[in-house]
Image: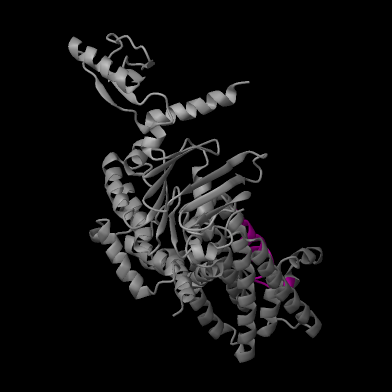
Amino acid sequence: MRPSGWQVMAGILMNSIYAMKNYPMVMVNTVLSPLSFLTVITFVSRGQLIGEAIEGGFIMSMFQAGMSLQGDLSHYKNDFKLQDMVVSTPSSPVAYVTGMAIGEIIYTLPALVVLVVLAGIYLNPGVVGALQLLAVLLLMFLASVTLGFTLSTFSSDIIQSFAFSRLISTLFSTLPPVYYPITYIPLPFRYFAYLSPTTYAAEIAQSATGLVQLSSGTLAIAWVVLSAVSLALLLISISKARWREV
Amino acid sequence: MSGEGLSCDALTKVYSGSKGKKALDSVSLNLPSTGIFSLIGMNGAGKTTLVRILATQLQPTSGRASINGMDVMKDAKKLRDHIACVPQEARTAPFMTPKQTVLSYLMWRGIGYREAGKKAVEALAKVGLEDQADVLARRLSGGTKRKVLVATVLSSDADIIFLDEPTTGLDPISRRDLWKLLSSLARDRFLILTTHYLEEAERLANTIGILHSGKLIELGTLDQLRATVRYQYSLMLPSAQDIPAVREGEVTVGGAGQTQILTNEGEAREISKSLLEKGTKFSMSRISLDDIFFHLVHGTDEEDSTP
Protein backbone atom coordinates (compact mmCIF):
# COMPACT_ATOMS: atom_id res chain seq x y z
CA MET A 1 0.00 0.00 0.00
CA ARG A 2 1.21 3.56 -0.72
CA PRO A 3 1.96 5.91 2.21
CA SER A 4 -1.25 7.85 1.50
CA GLY A 5 -3.19 4.57 1.85
CA TRP A 6 -1.75 4.02 5.33
CA GLN A 7 -2.55 7.63 6.21
CA VAL A 8 -6.19 7.01 5.27
CA MET A 9 -6.12 3.77 7.28
CA ALA A 10 -4.85 5.67 10.34
CA GLY A 11 -7.96 7.87 10.24
CA ILE A 12 -10.22 4.84 9.87
CA LEU A 13 -8.57 3.09 12.80
CA MET A 14 -8.76 6.09 15.08
CA ASN A 15 -12.20 7.34 14.13
CA SER A 16 -14.04 4.04 14.13
CA ILE A 17 -12.26 0.72 14.63
CA TYR A 18 -10.51 1.54 17.90
CA ALA A 19 -13.52 3.30 19.42
CA MET A 20 -15.86 0.46 18.37
CA LYS A 21 -13.41 -2.19 19.59
CA ASN A 22 -12.66 -0.52 22.92
CA TYR A 23 -16.14 0.95 23.59
CA PRO A 24 -18.72 -1.32 21.83
CA MET A 25 -21.58 0.68 23.41
CA VAL A 26 -20.91 3.59 21.03
CA MET A 27 -22.42 1.56 18.18
CA VAL A 28 -25.83 1.61 19.88
CA ASN A 29 -25.93 5.38 19.55
CA THR A 30 -25.41 5.32 15.79
CA VAL A 31 -28.27 2.85 15.36
CA LEU A 32 -30.61 4.63 17.72
CA SER A 33 -31.39 7.94 16.06
CA PRO A 34 -32.31 6.87 12.50
CA LEU A 35 -34.16 3.78 13.69
CA SER A 36 -36.13 5.61 16.36
CA PHE A 37 -37.45 8.08 13.77
CA LEU A 38 -38.24 5.18 11.45
CA THR A 39 -40.18 3.42 14.21
CA VAL A 40 -42.17 6.52 15.17
CA ILE A 41 -43.12 7.38 11.57
CA THR A 42 -44.05 3.75 10.85
CA PHE A 43 -46.30 3.53 13.94
CA VAL A 44 -47.94 6.94 13.43
CA SER A 45 -48.68 6.19 9.76
CA ARG A 46 -49.87 2.68 10.68
CA GLY A 47 -47.19 1.21 8.44
CA GLN A 48 -48.16 3.22 5.36
CA LEU A 49 -44.94 5.26 5.33
CA ILE A 50 -42.49 2.50 6.20
CA GLY A 51 -40.82 2.76 2.76
CA GLU A 52 -40.31 6.53 3.07
CA ALA A 53 -39.16 6.06 6.67
CA ILE A 54 -36.52 3.48 5.66
CA GLU A 55 -35.19 5.84 2.99
CA GLY A 56 -35.31 8.68 5.53
CA GLY A 57 -33.24 6.48 7.84
CA PHE A 58 -30.62 6.05 5.10
CA ILE A 59 -30.49 9.77 4.36
CA MET A 60 -30.35 10.73 8.02
CA SER A 61 -27.62 8.15 8.72
CA MET A 62 -25.44 9.39 5.87
CA PHE A 63 -26.01 13.05 6.62
CA GLN A 64 -25.40 12.58 10.33
CA ALA A 65 -22.25 10.59 9.58
CA GLY A 66 -20.91 13.62 7.73
CA MET A 67 -21.99 16.00 10.45
CA SER A 68 -20.53 13.76 13.14
CA LEU A 69 -17.26 14.22 11.31
CA GLN A 70 -17.48 17.91 12.13
CA GLY A 71 -17.91 17.20 15.85
CA ASP A 72 -15.23 14.50 15.89
CA LEU A 73 -12.66 16.51 13.95
CA SER A 74 -13.24 19.53 16.19
CA HIS A 75 -12.92 17.30 19.24
CA TYR A 76 -9.64 15.78 18.00
CA LYS A 77 -8.36 19.20 16.95
CA ASN A 78 -9.27 21.22 20.02
CA ASP A 79 -9.15 18.69 22.83
CA PHE A 80 -6.40 16.31 21.74
CA LYS A 81 -4.49 18.70 19.41
CA LEU A 82 -4.42 15.78 16.99
CA GLN A 83 -4.78 17.91 13.87
CA ASP A 84 -1.68 19.93 14.80
CA MET A 85 0.23 16.69 15.36
CA VAL A 86 -0.87 15.36 11.98
CA VAL A 87 -0.19 18.67 10.17
CA SER A 88 3.44 18.26 11.26
CA THR A 89 3.67 14.89 9.48
CA PRO A 90 3.84 14.02 5.77
CA SER A 91 0.07 13.36 5.79
CA SER A 92 -2.12 15.50 3.51
CA PRO A 93 -5.44 17.05 4.56
CA VAL A 94 -7.19 14.91 1.93
CA ALA A 95 -5.79 11.68 3.41
CA TYR A 96 -6.68 12.85 6.92
CA VAL A 97 -10.28 13.78 6.06
CA THR A 98 -10.83 10.75 3.83
CA GLY A 99 -9.73 8.36 6.59
CA MET A 100 -11.82 10.11 9.20
CA ALA A 101 -14.85 10.24 6.85
CA ILE A 102 -14.64 6.54 6.00
CA GLY A 103 -14.36 5.99 9.75
CA GLU A 104 -17.71 7.74 10.19
CA ILE A 105 -19.32 5.41 7.60
CA ILE A 106 -17.90 2.36 9.36
CA TYR A 107 -19.26 3.77 12.60
CA THR A 108 -22.66 4.01 10.92
CA LEU A 109 -22.49 0.47 9.53
CA PRO A 110 -24.66 -1.15 12.23
CA ALA A 111 -27.52 1.24 11.36
CA LEU A 112 -26.93 0.82 7.62
CA VAL A 113 -27.01 -2.98 7.91
CA VAL A 114 -30.39 -2.85 9.68
CA LEU A 115 -31.70 -0.41 7.06
CA VAL A 116 -30.44 -2.55 4.16
CA VAL A 117 -32.24 -5.57 5.61
CA LEU A 118 -35.45 -3.53 6.04
CA ALA A 119 -35.08 -2.10 2.51
CA GLY A 120 -34.72 -5.63 1.15
CA ILE A 121 -37.96 -6.63 2.88
CA TYR A 122 -40.15 -3.52 2.40
CA LEU A 123 -38.69 -1.61 -0.60
CA ASN A 124 -37.18 -4.15 -2.95
CA PRO A 125 -35.82 -1.34 -5.16
CA GLY A 126 -34.28 -3.36 -8.03
CA VAL A 127 -30.79 -2.80 -9.44
CA VAL A 128 -31.42 0.62 -11.04
CA GLY A 129 -33.33 1.89 -8.01
CA ALA A 130 -30.65 0.62 -5.64
CA LEU A 131 -27.92 2.32 -7.71
CA GLN A 132 -29.87 5.59 -7.68
CA LEU A 133 -30.34 5.29 -3.94
CA LEU A 134 -26.62 4.63 -3.49
CA ALA A 135 -25.69 7.64 -5.65
CA VAL A 136 -28.01 9.91 -3.66
CA LEU A 137 -26.59 8.70 -0.37
CA LEU A 138 -23.01 9.20 -1.55
CA LEU A 139 -23.79 12.74 -2.72
CA MET A 140 -25.49 13.43 0.60
CA PHE A 141 -22.46 12.10 2.44
CA LEU A 142 -20.05 14.13 0.30
CA ALA A 143 -22.04 17.31 1.01
CA SER A 144 -22.18 16.75 4.77
CA VAL A 145 -18.54 15.60 5.05
CA THR A 146 -17.17 18.63 3.21
CA LEU A 147 -19.42 20.94 5.22
CA GLY A 148 -18.34 19.17 8.41
CA PHE A 149 -14.62 19.41 7.64
CA THR A 150 -14.84 23.08 6.72
CA LEU A 151 -16.72 23.95 9.91
CA SER A 152 -14.35 21.87 12.04
CA THR A 153 -11.29 23.78 10.84
CA PHE A 154 -12.87 27.04 11.99
CA SER A 155 -14.15 25.78 15.30
CA SER A 156 -12.05 26.43 18.37
CA ASP A 157 -14.41 25.12 20.99
CA ILE A 158 -15.93 21.68 21.35
CA ILE A 159 -19.23 22.84 22.88
CA GLN A 160 -19.76 25.29 20.03
CA SER A 161 -18.81 22.56 17.59
CA PHE A 162 -21.24 19.93 18.91
CA ALA A 163 -23.96 22.59 19.08
CA PHE A 164 -23.33 23.39 15.40
CA SER A 165 -23.32 19.74 14.49
CA ARG A 166 -26.68 19.11 16.18
CA LEU A 167 -28.22 22.29 14.80
CA ILE A 168 -27.26 21.47 11.23
CA SER A 169 -28.31 17.84 11.62
CA THR A 170 -31.73 18.92 12.88
CA LEU A 171 -32.16 21.57 10.17
CA PHE A 172 -31.19 19.23 7.36
CA SER A 173 -32.19 15.75 8.40
CA THR A 174 -35.03 16.04 10.93
CA LEU A 175 -37.11 19.08 9.96
CA PRO A 176 -37.22 18.57 6.14
CA PRO A 177 -39.51 15.89 4.68
CA VAL A 178 -36.93 13.13 4.78
CA TYR A 179 -39.04 10.48 6.49
CA TYR A 180 -42.30 11.21 4.67
CA PRO A 181 -43.46 12.67 1.30
CA ILE A 182 -43.22 16.43 0.86
CA THR A 183 -46.95 16.54 0.08
CA TYR A 184 -47.63 16.08 3.80
CA ILE A 185 -46.30 19.59 4.41
CA PRO A 186 -48.76 22.50 3.97
CA LEU A 187 -47.97 24.41 0.78
CA PRO A 188 -46.41 27.63 2.10
CA PHE A 189 -43.94 25.62 4.19
CA ARG A 190 -43.01 23.37 1.27
CA TYR A 191 -40.92 26.20 -0.19
CA PHE A 192 -38.81 26.27 2.99
CA ALA A 193 -38.33 22.52 2.75
CA TYR A 194 -36.77 23.00 -0.68
CA LEU A 195 -33.99 25.05 0.95
CA SER A 196 -32.57 21.80 2.30
CA PRO A 197 -30.59 19.46 0.00
CA THR A 198 -31.94 16.51 1.96
CA THR A 199 -35.42 17.26 0.57
CA TYR A 200 -34.13 16.68 -2.97
CA ALA A 201 -32.28 13.55 -1.80
CA ALA A 202 -35.50 12.19 -0.28
CA GLU A 203 -37.48 12.98 -3.44
CA ILE A 204 -34.96 11.16 -5.64
CA ALA A 205 -34.86 8.19 -3.25
CA GLN A 206 -38.66 7.99 -3.05
CA SER A 207 -38.91 8.22 -6.84
CA ALA A 208 -36.20 5.57 -7.36
CA THR A 209 -38.18 3.06 -5.35
CA GLY A 210 -41.56 4.01 -6.81
CA LEU A 211 -42.96 5.55 -3.63
CA VAL A 212 -43.69 8.84 -5.43
CA GLN A 213 -44.14 9.67 -9.10
CA LEU A 214 -42.09 12.66 -10.19
CA SER A 215 -41.97 14.26 -13.64
CA SER A 216 -38.65 13.86 -15.40
CA GLY A 217 -38.18 17.64 -15.11
CA THR A 218 -38.64 17.63 -11.33
CA LEU A 219 -36.34 14.65 -11.00
CA ALA A 220 -33.69 16.31 -13.15
CA ILE A 221 -33.89 19.48 -11.04
CA ALA A 222 -33.49 17.39 -7.86
CA TRP A 223 -30.35 15.71 -9.24
CA VAL A 224 -28.90 19.03 -10.44
CA VAL A 225 -29.54 20.77 -7.10
CA LEU A 226 -28.14 17.89 -5.06
CA SER A 227 -25.05 17.57 -7.27
CA ALA A 228 -24.52 21.35 -7.35
CA VAL A 229 -24.78 21.63 -3.55
CA SER A 230 -22.31 18.76 -3.07
CA LEU A 231 -19.89 20.24 -5.61
CA ALA A 232 -20.19 23.73 -4.13
CA LEU A 233 -19.52 22.44 -0.62
CA LEU A 234 -16.55 20.44 -1.91
CA LEU A 235 -15.10 23.55 -3.59
CA ILE A 236 -15.71 25.64 -0.47
CA SER A 237 -13.96 23.06 1.67
CA ILE A 238 -10.98 22.98 -0.70
CA SER A 239 -10.64 26.75 -0.76
CA LYS A 240 -11.69 27.72 2.76
CA ALA A 241 -10.80 24.86 5.09
CA ARG A 242 -7.65 25.54 7.06
CA TRP A 243 -5.03 22.83 7.33
CA ARG A 244 -2.26 25.19 8.33
CA GLU A 245 -3.88 27.97 10.36
CA VAL A 246 -3.56 31.59 9.27
CA MET B 1 18.52 31.65 5.21
CA SER B 2 20.02 28.48 3.82
CA GLY B 3 22.15 25.62 5.14
CA GLU B 4 22.05 23.65 8.34
CA GLY B 5 20.52 25.08 11.48
CA LEU B 6 17.43 26.90 12.64
CA SER B 7 17.05 30.35 11.23
CA CYS B 8 14.38 33.03 11.68
CA ASP B 9 14.41 36.39 9.99
CA ALA B 10 12.09 39.11 11.32
CA LEU B 11 9.40 36.52 12.01
CA THR B 12 6.19 38.28 12.98
CA LYS B 13 2.70 37.04 13.77
CA VAL B 14 -0.42 39.11 14.25
CA TYR B 15 -3.56 37.02 14.86
CA SER B 16 -6.73 38.21 13.20
CA GLY B 17 -8.99 39.94 15.69
CA SER B 18 -6.05 40.88 17.95
CA LYS B 19 -6.30 44.58 17.01
CA GLY B 20 -2.78 44.54 15.61
CA LYS B 21 -1.14 43.13 18.73
CA LYS B 22 1.97 41.22 17.75
CA ALA B 23 2.06 37.70 19.19
CA LEU B 24 5.53 37.44 17.67
CA ASP B 25 7.45 40.62 17.02
CA SER B 26 10.25 40.47 14.46
CA VAL B 27 12.04 37.46 15.89
CA SER B 28 15.41 36.78 14.31
CA LEU B 29 17.80 34.04 15.33
CA ASN B 30 20.37 31.62 13.98
CA LEU B 31 21.49 28.53 15.81
CA PRO B 32 22.77 25.05 15.06
CA SER B 33 20.14 22.32 14.80
CA THR B 34 21.64 20.02 17.40
CA GLY B 35 20.89 19.24 21.02
CA ILE B 36 18.05 21.02 22.80
CA PHE B 37 16.88 24.56 22.13
CA SER B 38 14.58 25.74 24.89
CA LEU B 39 12.20 28.64 24.62
CA ILE B 40 11.16 30.23 27.89
CA GLY B 41 8.84 33.08 28.65
CA MET B 42 5.73 34.05 30.55
CA ASN B 43 2.21 33.12 29.42
CA GLY B 44 1.48 34.85 26.11
CA ALA B 45 5.17 35.53 25.44
CA GLY B 46 4.92 33.93 21.99
CA LYS B 47 6.53 30.53 22.64
CA THR B 48 3.69 28.43 21.23
CA THR B 49 3.22 30.80 18.29
CA LEU B 50 6.90 30.43 17.34
CA VAL B 51 6.78 26.64 17.72
CA ARG B 52 3.60 26.36 15.64
CA ILE B 53 5.11 28.45 12.84
CA LEU B 54 8.30 26.38 12.84
CA ALA B 55 6.31 23.13 12.96
CA THR B 56 4.40 24.29 9.83
CA GLN B 57 1.07 24.51 11.68
CA LEU B 58 0.66 28.27 11.50
CA GLN B 59 1.40 30.88 8.87
CA PRO B 60 3.52 33.84 9.93
CA THR B 61 2.22 37.30 9.09
CA SER B 62 5.65 38.33 7.81
CA GLY B 63 9.27 37.26 7.97
CA ARG B 64 10.87 33.94 7.15
CA ALA B 65 12.05 30.85 8.93
CA SER B 66 13.92 27.75 7.86
CA ILE B 67 15.25 24.58 9.42
CA ASN B 68 18.24 22.87 7.83
CA GLY B 69 17.71 24.90 4.68
CA MET B 70 14.00 24.08 4.35
CA ASP B 71 11.72 27.10 4.40
CA VAL B 72 8.75 26.56 6.74
CA MET B 73 6.37 27.98 4.15
CA LYS B 74 7.81 27.10 0.74
CA ASP B 75 9.29 23.72 1.67
CA ALA B 76 6.66 22.67 4.22
CA LYS B 77 5.94 19.38 2.47
CA LYS B 78 9.61 18.36 2.49
CA LEU B 79 10.14 19.67 6.02
CA ARG B 80 7.21 17.61 7.34
CA ASP B 81 9.19 14.42 6.54
CA HIS B 82 11.76 15.57 9.09
CA ILE B 83 9.65 17.01 11.92
CA ALA B 84 7.40 15.67 14.65
CA CYS B 85 5.50 17.72 17.18
CA VAL B 86 3.74 17.26 20.50
CA PRO B 87 1.65 20.43 20.78
CA GLN B 88 0.86 22.26 24.00
CA GLU B 89 -2.06 20.59 25.81
CA ALA B 90 -1.93 17.56 23.48
CA ARG B 91 -3.72 14.58 24.99
CA THR B 92 -4.03 10.92 24.21
CA ALA B 93 -7.52 9.81 23.14
CA PRO B 94 -9.06 8.05 26.16
CA PHE B 95 -10.56 5.31 24.00
CA MET B 96 -7.19 4.23 22.61
CA THR B 97 -4.31 2.30 24.11
CA PRO B 98 -0.72 3.59 24.01
CA LYS B 99 0.10 1.07 21.30
CA GLN B 100 -2.88 2.15 19.19
CA THR B 101 -1.95 5.82 19.70
CA VAL B 102 1.65 5.40 18.56
CA LEU B 103 0.71 3.01 15.76
CA SER B 104 -1.89 5.31 14.21
CA TYR B 105 0.49 8.28 14.47
CA LEU B 106 3.14 6.31 12.57
CA MET B 107 0.60 5.36 9.92
CA TRP B 108 -0.13 9.09 9.46
CA ARG B 109 3.57 9.38 8.75
CA GLY B 110 3.03 6.87 5.93
CA ILE B 111 4.42 3.77 7.66
CA GLY B 112 2.67 0.43 7.05
CA TYR B 113 0.54 -1.26 9.71
CA ARG B 114 2.95 -4.07 10.63
CA GLU B 115 6.05 -1.94 10.71
CA ALA B 116 4.17 0.74 12.66
CA GLY B 117 3.06 -1.86 15.19
CA LYS B 118 6.63 -3.07 15.63
CA LYS B 119 7.99 0.45 16.00
CA ALA B 120 5.21 1.35 18.45
CA VAL B 121 6.15 -1.56 20.72
CA GLU B 122 9.83 -0.57 20.56
CA ALA B 123 9.12 3.09 21.32
CA LEU B 124 6.86 2.24 24.24
CA ALA B 125 9.56 -0.05 25.62
CA LYS B 126 12.07 2.80 25.36
CA VAL B 127 9.87 4.98 27.57
CA GLY B 128 9.26 2.11 29.98
CA LEU B 129 5.63 1.50 29.01
CA GLU B 130 5.86 -2.01 27.57
CA ASP B 131 3.59 -3.32 30.35
CA GLN B 132 0.97 -0.65 29.71
CA ALA B 133 0.99 -0.79 25.91
CA ASP B 134 -2.51 -2.29 25.78
CA VAL B 135 -4.15 -0.38 28.63
CA LEU B 136 -6.80 2.20 27.66
CA ALA B 137 -5.43 5.74 28.00
CA ARG B 138 -8.25 6.77 30.32
CA ARG B 139 -6.81 4.39 32.91
CA LEU B 140 -3.30 5.86 32.72
CA SER B 141 -1.81 8.55 34.97
CA GLY B 142 -1.07 12.04 33.63
CA GLY B 143 2.66 11.33 33.56
CA THR B 144 2.18 8.08 31.66
CA LYS B 145 -0.05 9.79 29.09
CA ARG B 146 2.68 12.39 28.53
CA LYS B 147 5.20 9.59 28.05
CA VAL B 148 2.89 8.05 25.43
CA LEU B 149 2.93 11.33 23.50
CA VAL B 150 6.71 11.50 23.72
CA ALA B 151 6.79 7.88 22.50
CA THR B 152 4.81 8.90 19.39
CA VAL B 153 7.48 11.36 18.27
CA LEU B 154 10.27 9.07 19.49
CA SER B 155 8.92 6.24 17.35
CA SER B 156 9.13 8.35 14.19
CA ASP B 157 12.26 8.86 12.15
CA ALA B 158 11.87 12.64 12.47
CA ASP B 159 15.15 14.33 13.29
CA ILE B 160 13.62 17.62 14.46
CA ILE B 161 11.21 17.35 17.36
CA PHE B 162 8.99 20.05 18.83
CA LEU B 163 7.72 19.64 22.38
CA ASP B 164 5.51 22.44 23.63
CA GLU B 165 5.48 22.40 27.44
CA PRO B 166 5.82 18.61 27.65
CA THR B 167 6.10 18.48 31.44
CA THR B 168 3.37 20.92 32.45
CA GLY B 169 1.21 19.42 35.18
CA LEU B 170 3.53 16.52 35.92
CA ASP B 171 4.68 15.61 39.42
CA PRO B 172 8.41 16.11 40.14
CA ILE B 173 9.25 12.41 39.75
CA SER B 174 7.48 12.06 36.38
CA ARG B 175 9.09 15.30 35.25
CA ARG B 176 12.56 14.01 36.04
CA ASP B 177 11.78 10.73 34.26
CA LEU B 178 10.80 12.72 31.22
CA TRP B 179 13.95 14.85 31.41
CA LYS B 180 16.06 11.71 31.19
CA LEU B 181 14.09 10.64 28.17
CA LEU B 182 14.43 14.01 26.47
CA SER B 183 18.18 14.09 27.12
CA SER B 184 18.57 10.69 25.49
CA LEU B 185 16.37 11.80 22.56
CA ALA B 186 18.59 14.83 21.99
CA ARG B 187 21.66 12.68 21.42
CA ASP B 188 20.82 12.19 17.77
CA ARG B 189 17.98 14.65 17.17
CA PHE B 190 17.28 18.36 17.44
CA LEU B 191 14.71 19.16 20.10
CA ILE B 192 12.86 22.45 20.34
CA LEU B 193 11.32 22.61 23.77
CA THR B 194 9.15 25.26 25.39
CA THR B 195 8.74 25.32 29.11
CA HIS B 196 7.55 27.35 32.09
CA TYR B 197 9.97 25.51 34.32
CA LEU B 198 13.24 27.40 34.20
CA GLU B 199 15.01 24.59 36.04
CA GLU B 200 14.01 22.33 33.15
CA ALA B 201 15.57 24.64 30.57
CA GLU B 202 18.63 25.08 32.77
CA ARG B 203 19.15 21.33 33.05
CA LEU B 204 18.33 20.27 29.52
CA ALA B 205 19.00 23.04 27.02
CA ASN B 206 22.13 23.69 25.04
CA THR B 207 20.69 27.00 23.89
CA ILE B 208 18.00 29.08 25.60
CA GLY B 209 15.83 31.76 24.02
CA ILE B 210 13.89 34.16 26.23
CA LEU B 211 10.71 35.53 24.71
CA HIS B 212 8.85 38.43 26.24
CA SER B 213 5.78 40.11 24.74
CA GLY B 214 6.53 38.47 21.39
CA LYS B 215 10.15 39.65 21.29
CA LEU B 216 13.23 37.50 21.61
CA ILE B 217 15.01 39.45 24.33
CA GLU B 218 17.97 37.09 24.78
CA LEU B 219 19.45 34.01 23.16
CA GLY B 220 22.46 31.94 24.14
CA THR B 221 23.91 29.24 26.35
CA LEU B 222 23.32 29.51 30.08
CA ASP B 223 26.78 31.01 30.54
CA GLN B 224 26.16 33.52 27.78
CA LEU B 225 22.87 34.50 29.41
CA ARG B 226 24.61 34.87 32.79
CA ALA B 227 27.05 37.24 31.15
CA THR B 228 24.19 39.54 30.14
CA VAL B 229 23.25 40.33 33.73
CA ARG B 230 25.23 42.50 36.15
CA TYR B 231 25.76 40.09 39.02
CA GLN B 232 26.83 36.48 38.58
CA TYR B 233 26.62 35.10 42.11
CA SER B 234 23.76 34.52 44.50
CA LEU B 235 23.95 34.09 48.27
CA MET B 236 20.90 32.87 50.16
CA LEU B 237 20.49 33.57 53.87
CA PRO B 238 17.70 32.07 55.95
CA SER B 239 16.92 35.31 57.79
CA ALA B 240 17.23 39.03 57.27
CA GLN B 241 18.88 39.57 60.70
CA ASP B 242 22.42 38.68 59.71
CA ILE B 243 22.68 40.56 56.44
CA PRO B 244 26.26 41.70 56.05
CA ALA B 245 27.24 45.00 54.51
CA VAL B 246 27.09 44.71 50.72
CA ARG B 247 29.25 47.18 48.81
CA GLU B 248 28.17 46.12 45.36
CA GLY B 249 25.08 44.06 44.67
CA GLU B 250 21.35 43.75 45.26
CA VAL B 251 19.67 42.53 48.41
CA THR B 252 16.17 41.12 48.27
CA VAL B 253 14.31 40.14 51.43
CA GLY B 254 11.51 37.63 50.97
CA GLY B 255 8.24 37.53 52.91
CA ALA B 256 9.54 34.89 55.32
CA GLY B 257 12.76 36.84 55.87
CA GLN B 258 14.81 34.69 53.51
CA THR B 259 17.34 36.98 51.88
CA GLN B 260 19.04 36.83 48.52
CA ILE B 261 22.16 38.77 47.73
CA LEU B 262 23.16 39.07 44.09
CA THR B 263 26.69 40.25 43.61
CA ASN B 264 29.96 39.76 41.75
CA GLU B 265 32.45 36.97 42.43
CA GLY B 266 34.91 38.99 44.57
CA GLU B 267 32.20 40.48 46.75
CA ALA B 268 30.52 37.07 47.07
CA ARG B 269 33.77 35.58 48.40
CA GLU B 270 34.21 38.39 50.95
CA ILE B 271 30.62 38.16 52.17
CA SER B 272 30.79 34.39 52.48
CA LYS B 273 34.07 34.67 54.43
CA SER B 274 32.47 37.06 56.94
CA LEU B 275 29.35 34.88 57.21
CA LEU B 276 31.49 31.81 57.89
CA GLU B 277 33.40 33.68 60.60
CA LYS B 278 30.10 34.64 62.26
CA GLY B 279 28.82 31.08 61.91
CA THR B 280 25.78 32.21 59.87
CA LYS B 281 24.18 29.54 57.73
CA PHE B 282 24.00 30.43 54.02
CA SER B 283 24.36 29.00 50.54
CA MET B 284 26.23 30.41 47.59
CA SER B 285 25.87 29.58 43.89
CA ARG B 286 26.18 31.07 40.46
CA ILE B 287 22.95 32.80 39.54
CA SER B 288 20.21 30.54 38.19
CA LEU B 289 18.17 30.91 35.03
CA ASP B 290 15.39 32.03 37.36
CA ASP B 291 17.45 35.07 38.42
CA ILE B 292 18.52 35.79 34.85
CA PHE B 293 14.95 35.53 33.59
CA PHE B 294 13.63 37.81 36.33
CA HIS B 295 16.28 40.45 35.66
CA LEU B 296 15.91 40.37 31.90
CA VAL B 297 12.11 40.41 31.86
CA HIS B 298 11.87 42.91 34.70
CA GLY B 299 14.47 45.11 32.94
CA THR B 300 12.52 44.99 29.69
CA ASP B 301 9.28 45.93 31.46
CA GLU B 302 11.00 48.88 33.18
CA GLU B 303 12.42 50.07 29.84
CA ASP B 304 8.97 49.80 28.25
CA SER B 305 7.34 51.80 31.05
CA THR B 306 9.95 54.60 30.91
CA PRO B 307 8.27 57.61 29.30
Relative side of B242 to B9, left or right: left
Q: Is residue B290 above or below residue B49?
A: above
Rendered view: A182 above or below B181: below
Q: Residue at x 49, y 78 (%)?
A: A113
The residue under the point 34% across, 73% down is: B115
Is residue B180 depicted above or below A50 in this figure? above
Q: Is residue A108 above or below residue B185?
A: below
Q: Nearer the viewer, residue A244 or A224?
A: A244
Quadrant of the rendering where the N terminus of chain A is positioned: bottom left
On the question of residue A43 being in view, the answer is no
Where are the magenta residues, as a range? A164-182
Residue A56 visible somewhere in the drawing: yes
Give the color scheme: rainbow, by chain, secondary structure or one colour: one colour
Q: Residue A119, position in %: x, y?
A: 56, 82
> Is residue B213 on the magenta stretch?
no
Is residue A71 shown left or right of residue A213? left
Image quadrant in which you'd find residue A215:
bottom right
Does residue A176 show up magenta in the picture?
yes
